[in-house]
Amino acid sequence: MKLQDIASFIKSANAGASYLTFDIGFPSAETFHRVSGSGVITQELIATLYPIKPSDVQIYAYEPSLVIKITIPRPVASGGLAERDFDGVQQFAPLLDIEGAWER
């Protein structure tokens, strides 16, 4: 099952001018725990999807909001000449197809 099939939402945004943040929300605590405890969403996986070093990936599972938050460095600073997505809102797409054995 793909992440997009189990998550309530998957979104991205700027976290300042130098970082992107991804939020993956879930419809229930049970679903949140199945995904966050699966070991599928790792620094290594995210580093592969967004060509960066695994050590540059920060992953937080925040149970009160049923959200997994991921923060990575932006490839270029927000607003720079090479910028393709000023607000960072189009960068979540690679997360949609993450597959895991988290279905019931």
Image: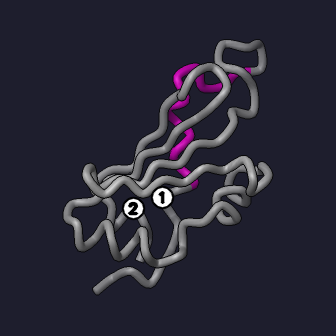
Residue 33 image offset from top left, x and y in percent: 33, 71
* Residue 73 rendering spot, x and y as whole percentages: 69, 36
Gap in angstroms between the C-alphas marked 1 and 2: 5 Å
Q: Badges 1 and 2: C-beta atoms under 8 Å apart?
A: yes
- By secondary structure, the bulk of the magenta-drawn segment is best described as loop
Q: Residues within 10 Å of mark 2 (few under 14, many from 20)?
A: some
62 and 19: which is toward the camera: 62
Q: Is residue 99 above or below residue 80?
A: below
Pick the front one: 9 or 44: 44
Across and down, in percent, residue 10 comes to 40, 49
Q: What's the magenta region? A: 83-94
Q: Is residue 32 magenta?
A: no
**Percent position (x, y) of residue 31?**
28, 71
The residue labelled by disc 1 is 96
Q: Quadrant of the N terminus?
A: bottom left
> Mark number for residue 4?
2
